[in-house]
Image (spheres, grey):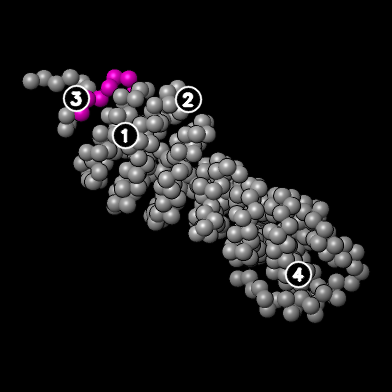
């Protein structure tokens, strides 16, 4: 007996209209019959996940019954079941891509609240993906960044749990602040700024109590190492053969300054106090000012330090504690006065 084009194995008929509730019912049936990931069904699962994002975005704007069915059947739980198996990067990448597309395009606030309400998203965030796979890493961090753009005083409590004192969207993201890929580092910086902009005191208190000191300490350490790398490039490039590398380092340096500036301009006093303290005591004094003291360091280090210091204070000197330090530094006639204090600071922060 011949079967029509809509026939799929297991007695499933694929509707002709991909933008319909019937099509989502069909996709649900496919997931239900393929809950165990195998080599034979990976292609089918990938196509199903891709189609789910498409139909949900359409339903968000045209037919509320589509989202009602998705939530009624708890279809997001299938994503978790697939993820927790050894499904391989092929399926994992599509799953993350589907989530990213879905959350990026959802416009209806009620639909967004329903998607976030069952805590599946936080379970996905803390899942142990294979981050050695570049595609998985890229789609994961993109997913986190997309979620951060959905943060506001109403949605923050889907991500920050005041009772358990847990905020995986933020704490998982900042683990990658110094990732080798610049795209990942930029995404982390964007996400943190989106978090800081949410006016929620309990969430900001969590960040200040649990993460601000270690995060800003590591960030300043990373920036300090970057300055040393920049200085090394200047010193070794006597034949001017490393201009592209030097240009990349300078561009990254400017990104760091803009990021610091963006944080300080949010005027969150508790965060600014911690950040300014680390900047002064773990970067400006021990690394930059020490290099300006006469007869201490080579000319290249002094040039880099002077340029960095002027650029930094040009960008963020509006912040009064740093502005005071700026005036004390550059209006002083003798930099030698810093030498004794600098030696004391240097033991607190060693850059490698």
* Number of dots carrying numbers: 4
Q: Is residue 24 shown above or below 334?
A: above
Mark 2 or mark 1, earlier in chain: 1
Question: Residue 314's spot in the image, x, y percent?
Answer: 80, 53
Judged left or right of residue 337, residue 156 is left
**Residue shown at the point (25%, 39%) measured from the top left:** 32
Q: Is residue 46 shown above or below 333?
A: above
Question: Residue 291's spot in the image, x, y percent?
Answer: 76, 70
Q: Label 4 vs label 2: CA separation?
A: 55 Å
Question: Which is in the foreground here, disc 4 or disc 1?
Answer: 1
The tag on residue 261 is: none
Residue positioned most to the front:
163
Judged left or right of residue 157, residue 121 is left
Question: Residue 276's spot in the image, x, y percent?
Answer: 73, 62
Is most of the magenta stretch helix, strand or loop?
loop
Residue 242 visible at all: no
Q: Which residues are magenta?
A: 12-18
Mark 2 or mark 3, earlier in chain: 3
Q: Nearer the viewer, residue 247 or 306?
A: 306
The residue at which mark 1 appears reads as 47
Judged left or right of residue 281, residue 88 is left
Q: Label 2 vs label 3: CA separation?
A: 29 Å
Q: Label 4 vs label 1: CA separation?
A: 56 Å
The tag on residue 61 is: 2
Q: Label 1 vs label 3: CA separation?
A: 16 Å
Mark 4 or mark 2, earlier in chain: 2
The residue at which mark 3 appears reads as 7
């Amino acid at each position: 007996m011949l079967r029509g084009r809509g026939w799929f194995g297991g007695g499933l008929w694929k509707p002709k209209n991909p933008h319909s509730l019937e099509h989502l019912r069909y996709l649900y049936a496919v997931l239900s019959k393929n809950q165990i990931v195998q080599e034979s069904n990976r292609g089918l699962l990938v196509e199903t996940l891709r189609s789910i994002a498409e139909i949900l975005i359409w339903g968000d704007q045209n037919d509320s019954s589509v989202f009602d069915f998705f939530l009624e059947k708890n279809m997001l739980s299938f994503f978790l079941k697939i993820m927790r198996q050894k499904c391989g990067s092929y399926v994992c990448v599509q799953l993350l891509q589907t989530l990213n597309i879905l959350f990026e395009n959802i416009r209806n606030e009620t639909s967004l609240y329903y998607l976030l309400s069952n805590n599946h998203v936080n379970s996905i965030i803390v899942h142990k993906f294979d981050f050695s796979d570049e595609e998985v890493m890229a789609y994961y961090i993109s997913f986190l960044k997309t979620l951060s753009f959905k943060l506001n005083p109403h949605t923050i409590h889907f991500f920050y749990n005041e009772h358990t004192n847990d905020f995986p969207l933020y704490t998982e993201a900042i683990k990658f602040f110094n990732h080798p890929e610049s795209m990942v580092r930029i995404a982390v910086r964007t996400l943190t700024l989106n978090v800081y902009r949410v006016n929620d005191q309990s969430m900001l208190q969590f960040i200040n109590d649990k993460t601000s000191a270690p995060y800003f300490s590591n960030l300043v350490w990373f920036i300090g190492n970057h300055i040393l790398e920049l200085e090394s490039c200047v010193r070794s490039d006597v034949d001017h053969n490393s201009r592209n590398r030097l240009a990349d380092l300078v561009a990254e340096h400017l990104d760091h300054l803009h990021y610091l500036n963006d944080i300080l301009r949010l005027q969150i006093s508790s965060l600014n106090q911690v950040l300014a303290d680390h900047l002064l005591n773990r970067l400006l004094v021990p690394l930059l000012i020490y290099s300006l003291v006469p007869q201490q360091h080579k000319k290249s280090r002094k040039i880099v330090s002077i340029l960095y210091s002027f650029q930094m204070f040009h960008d963020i000197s509006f912040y009064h504690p740093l502005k005071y330090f700026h005036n004390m530094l550059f209006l002083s006639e003798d930099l030698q006065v810093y030498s004794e204090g600098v030696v004391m600071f240097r033991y607190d922060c060693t850059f490698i």
